Image (cartoon, rainbow, N blue to C red):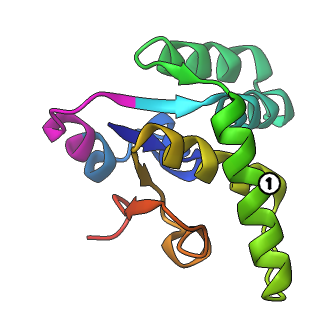
Amino acid sequence: MRLLDTDTCIWLLRGDARVIEHRARILDEVATTWITASALFYGAARSRHPDDSAASVLELLTTMPVLELDAVSARIFGEAKALLERRGERLDDSDLLIGAIAATHGAVLVTGNVRHFSRIPGVTLENWLRP
């Protein structure tokens, strides 16, 4: 399974050919998280055309499962956050939640922010935004 991060979904919404081609080549299931869905709707609400933007987000989300937080993901989140704090490294809770959901499902997290997410133990990453 490939789990799309917010930045990858934004490029899909913008019609980026490179990202669209990557998605078309993937034989595995492609999903995203409720955190990413929420961020996309937030961006839509702040856009110049909120109704049109929200409709585009909804259309994208109907093409893939939106994974939720479960007890296993919550535990991974808590352990990863504590580990990173002990190391003096911090990540936004939303990114830790996305990483925890990816780890729970054994999914490859597709993001342009590989350096950022690589600090989360147990998360495999892929970048569709770079050539």
Please give the name of the residue rendered at 84% of the width and 88% of the height, measured from the top-left corner: 88
In the image, taking residue 115 as reference, residue 130 lies left or right, namely left
Residue on which disc 1 sits: 78
In the image, the segment drawn in magenta is 21-30
Above or below — where is 10 with respect to 57? below
The residue most toward the bottom is 88
Q: Quadrant of the N terminus?
A: top left
Percent coordinates x, y for residue 39 in the rendering: 74, 37
Q: Is 109 located above or below residue 86 in the figure?
A: above
Instruction: Name the residue at 70% across, 55% down.
Output: 95
Q: Nearer the viewer, residue 91 or 80?
A: 80
- Residue 31 pos. (x, y %): 44, 29
| Residue ID at (85%, 78%) | 85
Choose top left, top right, bottom left or bottom right for residue 121: bottom right
Residue 38 in the image: x percent, y percent? Answer: 75, 30
Instruction: Check the image and report above or below for 64 versus 101.
Output: above
Report the residue at 47% width, 42% height from top. Answer: 4
